[in-house]
Structures are given as structure tokens and as C-alpha cells.
Image (spheres, rainbow, N blue to C red):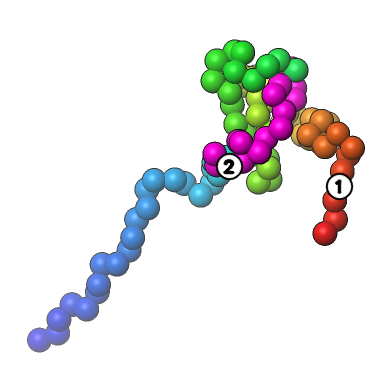
Amino acid sequence: GHGHGHGAHGHEHAAAPATQPVATDAMIAAYSLKTCVVSGEPLGSMGKTIDHLHEGRLVRFCCKGCVEEFKADPSRYLAKLDPAGARTTP
């Protein structure tokens, strides 16, 4: 008889869906702005800070509403993260 040689080695990682990357502690520590790029309010002033990754880049907001505002015009707010408009090419 045949042994059923289907080794059940499908490792299901149901922990973190790959669709929503999360900011690491290191990214948060390296984040220089103390205020929300949209409202200018101090981060944490309206409760828990919203950490949003835009194309792998951390942007922090004071509230959910600011995230929507950011998504409407990301480049405008990303410019605030680069004071010199530094588009550094390697």
C-alpha cells in the first residue's frame, strides 16, 4: 500500500498580514518630528499617535482624520519631512 506522503508543512503565520507593514520601534525612535505633519499638533496630544507607513516611510499623525488628509495629498506633507526637499539619490 501507498503511504500518504503529503507532509503537512504549510506553516500558517496568522500573526501579521503582509499587507499592513508596521512601524518598528527603531523607526519611531528615528522619527524626528514631534508634531503632526498635517495639523501641526503635538503628537500624542489627541490620544494615541497614529503611525502610518507611506511607501515604507514612517509618518506620524495626531489622529485618524489627519491620515485621511495626508492620503489626499501625500507629497505635500512628505515635503515637511524633508525640510530641504532632500530627494537624495544614492
- Asked whether residue 69 appears in the rendered view, the answer is no
Q: Quadrant of residue 57?
A: top right
Mark 2 = which residue?
26
The spot of residue 71 in percent (x, y) is 71, 31
- Numbered range of the magenta stretch: 24-39
Q: Nearer the viewer, residue 17 or 43?
A: 43
Residue 46's label in the rendered image is none
Mark 2: secondary structure: helix
49 to the left or right of 37: left
Tell me if label 2 and label 1 are in contact, CB under 8 Å.
no
Report the predominant secondary structure element of the magenta stretch: loop
Amino acid type at mark 1: Arg
- Disc 2 residue type? Ala
Q: Mark yes or no: residue 62 visible.
A: yes
Assign the N terminus to one quadrant of the image.
Answer: bottom left
Place of residue 74 in the rendered image (x, y in percent of width and height, measured from the top left): 77, 34
Residue designated by label 1: 87
At x 37%, y 48%, the residue is 14
Mark before the other along the chain sequence, 2 or 1: 2
